[in-house]
């Protein structure tokens, strides 16, 4: 939506169209299910702030700089979580895939989550660095297209790599990972 409107009417209208798309998604969810998912609500709040600041400054650079800073801050959060011995990768995994406390207490599992948190920190730093480089050196249309592909690709590749790494790491410690229909099961 942003790229199409940008090409037709310019950056200001593209920002408005992106915001309108978000509002439309919320209204649609309210009409169809009566509930707005938390992630949609959070992303819409962020988009509202980003759009408002960008329209007030008249800067497309500011519009795209904000998520780049956010990505870097996510990297800092993953790194800091390791420093305080509460790896964020573990917390995210628990949110998506409940694991038994005795599994989480296993030294190999704890070590994996610390290392995985560091991997996620690096991936976010690399993503933010490339995004900043693009923003500073490439035309806006290139930034939009590359970032639209780059973010999801980094995310998917890191998830797949971490899942495969987890299975391999657990096998190295004699722990079999079996994915049940509802919850994964680890067997020592």
Image (spheres, grey):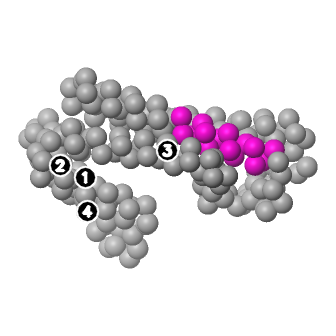
Residue 4 position within the rendered picture, expressed as x and y whole percent measured from the top left: 19, 39
Q: Is residue 90 left or right of residue 40?
A: right
Residue 185 position within the rendered picture, expressed as x and y whole percent measured from the top left: 81, 55
| 113 magenta-colored | yes
Which stretch appears magenta?
108-122
* Residue 23: assigned label: 4
Please report the residue visible at 36 percent of the width from the left and 43 percent of the height from the top: 69
Tell me the quarter of the picture where residue 138 sits.
Answer: top left
The reply to whether callout 1 and callout 4 are in contact (CB within 8 Å) is: no
Please report the residue visible at 40 percent of the width from the left and 74 percent of the height from the top: 35
Camera-side residue of 121 and 24: 121
Mark 1 or mark 4, which has the lower sequence index? 4
Please report the residue visible at 11 percent of the width from the left and 45 percent of the height from the top: 58
Q: Tell us which disc is closer to us: 1 or 4.
A: 1
Residue 62 position within the rendered picture, expressed as x and y whole percent measured from the top left: 22, 42
Mark 1 or mark 3, which has the lower sequence index? 1
Instruction: Give the main secondary structure of the magenta stretch.
Output: helix
* Residue 50: assigned label: 1
Residue tagged 3: 76
Q: Is residue 181 above or below residue 13?
A: below
Residue tagged 2: 54
């Amino acid at each position: 939506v942003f790229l199409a409107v940008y090409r037709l009417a310019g950056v200001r209208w593209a920002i408005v169209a992106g915001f309108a798309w978000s509002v439309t998604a919320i209204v649609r969810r309210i009409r169809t299910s009566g509930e707005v998912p938390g992630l949609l609500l959070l992303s819409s709040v962020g988009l509202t702030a980003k759009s408002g600041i960008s329209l007030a400054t008249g800067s497309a650079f500011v519009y795209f700089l904000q998520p780049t800073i956010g990505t870097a801050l996510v990297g800092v959060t993953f790194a800091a979580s390791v420093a305080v011995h509460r790896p964020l990768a573990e917390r995210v995994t628990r949110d998506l895939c409940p694991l038994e406390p005795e599994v989480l207490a296993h030294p190999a599992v704890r070590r994996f989550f610390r290392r995985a948190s560091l991997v996620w920190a690096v991936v976010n730093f690399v993503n933010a660095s490339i995004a900043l480089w693009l923003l500073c050196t490439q035309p806006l249309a290139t930034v939009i297209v590359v970032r639209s592909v780059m973010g999801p690709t980094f995310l998917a590749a890191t998830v797949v790599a971490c899942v495969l790494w987890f299975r391999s790491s657990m096998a190295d410690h004699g722990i079999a990972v079996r994915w049940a229909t509802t919850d994964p099961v680890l067997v020592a």
